[in-house]
Image (cartoon, grey):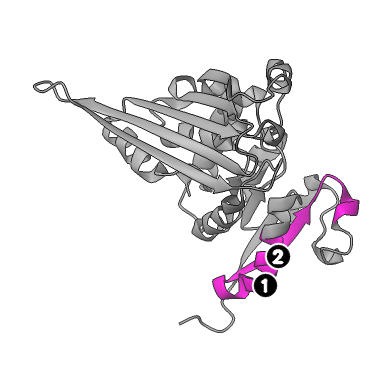
Amino acid sequence: MKMSGERKRRIGIVGFGRIGRYLVQRIEEEGYKHDLELAFVWNRSAEGLQGRVPGHLQLLDLLDFDECKADLIIEVADPCITRDFGERFLRAADFLVGSPTALADQTTESKLREMAGRSGHTLYVPSGAFWGGEDIQRMAERGTLQGLKITMAKHPKSFRLVGELVEKNNQVVNERTILFEGPVRSLCALAPNNVNTMAAACVAAHTLGFDNVVGVLVADPSIPDWHHVEIEVTGPTNEKSGQTFAVKTSRWNPAEPSSVTGSATFLSFWSSLLVCKGHGGRVYLC
């Protein structure tokens, strides 16, 4: 039973796109059930908050976030936020990095891991569309994880790409086309808003990491309202029989046409938020 006057966990939301708006609404409507309340909401364009977020919760300058005394800060804006503010966030509060492609930058990942250890705050990485993440993490911890490959297929219009993949994607008309196959670290720089699932996988599969988890990005015009993710896990080989442990999962996430984010992702983020209650100075998949 909850005690009267029990302190609520204060949540800061950085980013007010579709996921940010969803989380703000859920906290406003259901936060009392989970001892949660908003500490602040920041958006790159302050005008986007007008009429949607009470004035006293609008944070106009992100550099002033510490004045709001948040217990947990959630980034759902852009990978550059984690690169530029992640250390500061972790110094003051637990931090959920909603764009884990930011961790593909080795310097950023190292700094955040170090700060989590020094501050005692937790760096949370949401599993998102990464099915079976906890099992894969346990395999990595036991030293039995040998390989991990993730194939993500979306309609060409559902991608936000940069660099060499832009033109390649623009040329896709009717045929299912592989845009990229290789280390996830390289892919994160080319599709920072599309492969957060793969980045979360690299965190879980920490013995392989961003350089040895294989990512495959596929443009498929035949699936305008779906995001399809296949995960292939390879474990140890039996020396006597030659048999190799393997698991393959296939996840179909409904999505609005041309949408970067599948519909199931919103509920997944809310579930991740509810897990973030402080797990000490470490990285934690949620």
- Tell me: 126 left or right of 89: left
Q: Residues within 10 Å of mark 1 (few under 14, many from 20)?
A: few
| Quarter of the figure that contains the N terminus | bottom left
- Assess whether residue 43 is covered by the magenta stretch: yes
Q: 68 or 216: which is nearer to us?
A: 216
Mark identifier at residue 29: 1
Q: Amino acid at mark 2?
A: Gln
Residue at the location (53% across, 54% down)?
Answer: 272
**Height in image: 85 above or below 179?**
below
Is residue 139 shown to the viewer in this render? yes
Q: Amino acid at mark 1?
A: Glu
- Where residue 102 sits, quadrant-wise, is top right
Residue at the location (76% across, 56% down)?
Answer: 41
Q: Tell me where the magenta segment starts and ends, as one range.
A: 23-48
- Assess whether residue 229 is covered by the magenta stretch: no
| Secondary element type, mark 2 | helix
Residue at the location (33% across, 33% down)?
Answer: 140
| Secondary element type, mark 1 | helix
